[in-house]
Image (cartoon, coloured by chain):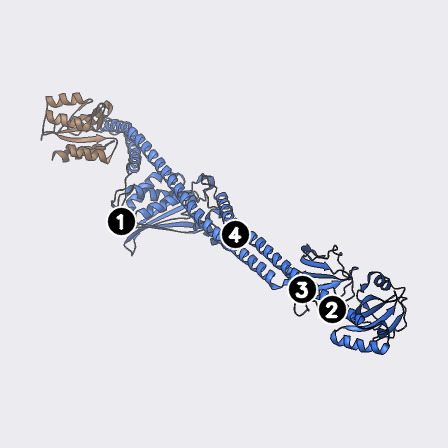
Chain colours: A blue, B brown
Amino acid sequence: MKRLVPQFLREGALPADGEALFDYRRIWWQAIIGVASVALVPVVVLSFLNHRLYRGAFATESLARVDHQLADTHRSLSIFLQEREAALAFIVNDNEFEVLTDQERLTELFSHLSTAFRGFVDLGVIDDQGHQLSYVGPYDLRGRNYAEQDWFSHVRERGIFVSDVFRGFRDVPHFAIAARHARPDGGFYIVRATIDAARLGDHLPSRSQSTHLDAFIINHDGILQTESNRHGAILTRRDEPMPPVSTTPVVTETVGTNSELMFRGYVYVPETPFIIIVTTTPAQMGGAWWQVQGTLLGILVTSVICIMIVVLLAVTFLVERVFEADLKRTVVIHHMEHTSKIASVGRLAAGVAHEINNPLAIINERAGLLEDLFTFSGQYEEDEKVLGITRSIIRSVKRCSRITHRLLSFAKHVDVVFEPLDLAEIIQEVLDLLGKEAEHRDIRLIMHFADGTPKVLSDRGQLQQIYLNIINNAFAAIEDGGLIEIDVKQNQEGMVKTTISDDGCGISQDNIKRIFEPFFSTKGDKGTGLGLSITYGLVNKLGGVISVKSEKEKGTSFTVSFPIDPPESIKEVRS
Amino acid sequence: MTPLRILLVDDEEELVSSCAERLTFRGIDARYVTTGLDAVEATKEQPFDVVVLDVKMPGLSGTKLMRKLDETRAGMKFVFLTGHGSEVDFKECCEAGAASYLVKPVDIKHLVEKLKEVVE
């Protein structure tokens, strides 16, 4: 999981001294947001536009279907009613009143009528007083008076009447058509027939034929005159507001009672109580709407996920490369600053050493002359105290001289020059510089320099720096009275191996993996975190290898091996 | 046996005077001067087996002085003395014709051995 986290987000990845690397977290987030926006906005906009376009096309098609169905149903129903009215008119025109009121004759006429036109339930003739003079049908309605009924008044005034659907005596839904006819004596009579309401449903698309449309007929009170997929059985009340009156078809997009999108068409059939309504919803249109929407959404979601993954990977990759380059630049700058500092210190040390050498030489010669005067002249030759003091001065001068020579030796090596070098001698030169501290802190130094160890072809200055860094770290790690062991010998791989071990505080296993990383330090604010990183770089530059083993509270052991004769590529002079 | 005749040239009088006296104790005929001009005059007056001179003296480099002294009296050997210890200086001095090179402060025994070695 850690490997998925970008380097610049990991804890401790950035230099501890707050060096001005860019704010890579901010850059990373900004890049992701920027690139993702540029990539996603067109996709989202296109998806939205596509959705709108498809929705518009879908709506247009749905409305067209509704309109088409509405027109078909209106036409069919109108023709049906007109045919029935025409049939009744034919019977009346073709037969005298007396024939029509003759029961046997009426029965015969009804039989012919039923054969020619499906759906007639009964037929009756009613005089202008409302009495039913003759009747053919399943009920015993002869002699009944309808003068008080609304339909009688309606047909008397308007001449024609079509009723809405009602349940008859046998509880079977049907409706009636009544027509008024004038008699020669000025009176009138009414011919009334009832028709099975199921015949109305013949003009609507059946359920099996059209699952995506709901076509039905209601009356002006909202009572279903036919079955409806959506609203229920015949003669139940439709629980939606009545549409405005219109005898021409009206087709609109609307919102249903459940807030769903709906396409509706309706038309009031003139001279009848019927309103034809055709509706459809996207759900009723079936899989087409949802399939397309689902596909669009699937494509959108997949695209967004793929784009985000690619953006994340690409941005992370690029920002990491920039981060690595920036880190390397910072390391190089630090290295250069460090090298420059070392060079400055070296030059300063050289200057100081040079300036000190002259007065030291004077002290040396004067003390030496004093000794010679005492010795050669015989004066004070037996005075051990005077000679002792003189010789002590000369010894101190020699000690100072060794120190200044060491400083000069460190300072003069700037360019890399390969020459045969005895590693034991180099280490000893470094220890000479640190000898006073070792003595002061009572640190035990044990050296094992194997006999016959060959010299290595290397650069004196860089080797001194390498061993100085490692031995300095050992000094820092151990307590007063601690132990440092140094072992130098040839190993089997044609290299000379140096092992520097201490019994100090040791390094934890977590830290040891990072010990050669730039800016990593276990010394808190005291360390720049560059010492071992630079040492690692120098060892590699000289063709060597360095490794470390450590155990907390037990000690640390650095092993550095250098080739006796490095390859040509290593021996190029490098500064 | 004729003692070695040595001329010491260094601007630090305390240094060269003590060194000359110490060499004298050791049977060497040592003179000293503190300027290049005095060194030229001294070599005009008498020949020396070895001239021991500082690499850098005020206003004059040791190598230039060496050439001047060699022109004055040929055949003398030259040993440079310095507090610097630069390899570049060593190379320059050897290329200029010096016989050897010593770094201050010099051990008197080492100096005597070097002088005898150079003459031989």
Mark seen at residue A83: 2
Q: Residues within 10 Å of mark 3 (few under 14, many from 20)?
A: some
| Number of the front mark, 3 or 2 | 2
How many other residues sit within 10 Å of disc 1, few (<14), some (14-19) or many (≥20)? few
> What is the distance, in whole Å, between disc 4 and disc 1 at their CAs?
54 Å
x then y, percent, for residue A88:
78, 70
Q: Residue tagged by mark 4?
A: A43
Is A496 positioned to the left or the right of A548 in the image?
A: left
Residue at which label 3 appears:
A72
The amino acid at mark 2 is Glu
Q: Badge 4 sits on which subunit?
A: A
Answer yes or no: is residue A97 visible: yes
Name the foreground residue: A19 vs B92: A19
Are circles 2 and 1 on residues that touch, CB within 8 Å?
no
Q: Between tags 4 and 2, which lies in front?
A: 2
Is residue A552 something that shows in the picture? no
- Kindly state the secondary structure of the residue where label 4 is placed: helix
Q: Position of residue A451 (x, y in %)?
A: 26, 51
Observer-nearest of A164 and B92: A164
Specify the label residue A569 is tagged with. Answer: 1
Name the subunit of mark 3.
A
Q: Which quadrant of the structure image shows residue A159?
A: bottom right
Chain of residue at mark 1: A
Secondary structure, mark 3, is helix
**Earlier sequence position, callout 4 versus callout 2:** 4
Query: Looking at this view, is A138 or A567 the one in front?
Result: A138
